[in-house]
Image: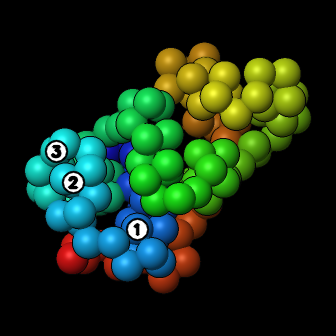
Amino acid sequence: MSNLNINAGAAVARFRKRIKMPQTELAELLGMTRTSVSNIERGKQAMSLAMFCRIADLLHIDAADLLSEVIKPQNSIARDRLEEKGVEGWVIDIMQGTLPESNIFFVEGGDDEQKTN
């Protein structure tokens, strides 16, 4: 499991719980099983950028705001790349490995519980 998957999943769980949406409801809206949603939230199943954006939309949050709960630029290389490419281009670089994880900071998830509802 990568830090990106774990932190992205934890952010999804945090926002889903804030709006009091059960995993079963999110799963139904996404056309997947509750187990898949649980696996995403625990970082055991990766999300595509499209899925991340779709989940953000279903949770009524801008994808960039959700992403800011997950990662931050760690240094000038990452900040410059973020300014140059925007959030989506920056995330694609991270996912493709052209911007190594050493250039980003993974936001710790506060009071996250790894329990599911």
Circles 3 and 2: CB atoms closer than 8 Å: yes
* Residue pointed to by mark 2: 27
101 or 69, nearer to the observer: 69
- Which amino acid, mark 3? Met
Q: Residue at x 86, y 29 (%)?
A: 83
Vertical comparison of 29 with 42: above or below = above
31 or 2, nearer to the observer: 31
- Which amino acid, mark 1? Arg
* Residue pointed to by mark 3: 32
24 or 74, nearer to the observer: 24
Classify the position of the C terminus by image quarter. Answer: bottom left
6 or 22, nearer to the observer: 22
* Residue pointed to by mark 1: 16
Q: Residue at x 64, y 28 (%)?
A: 88
Coordinates of residue 59 in the picture (x, y in percent):
46, 59
Return the disc, 1 or 2, that comes first in the chain's sequence: 1
What number is the disc on residue 80? none
Q: Dot 1: few (<14), some (14–19), or many (≥20) neighbours within 10 Å?
A: many
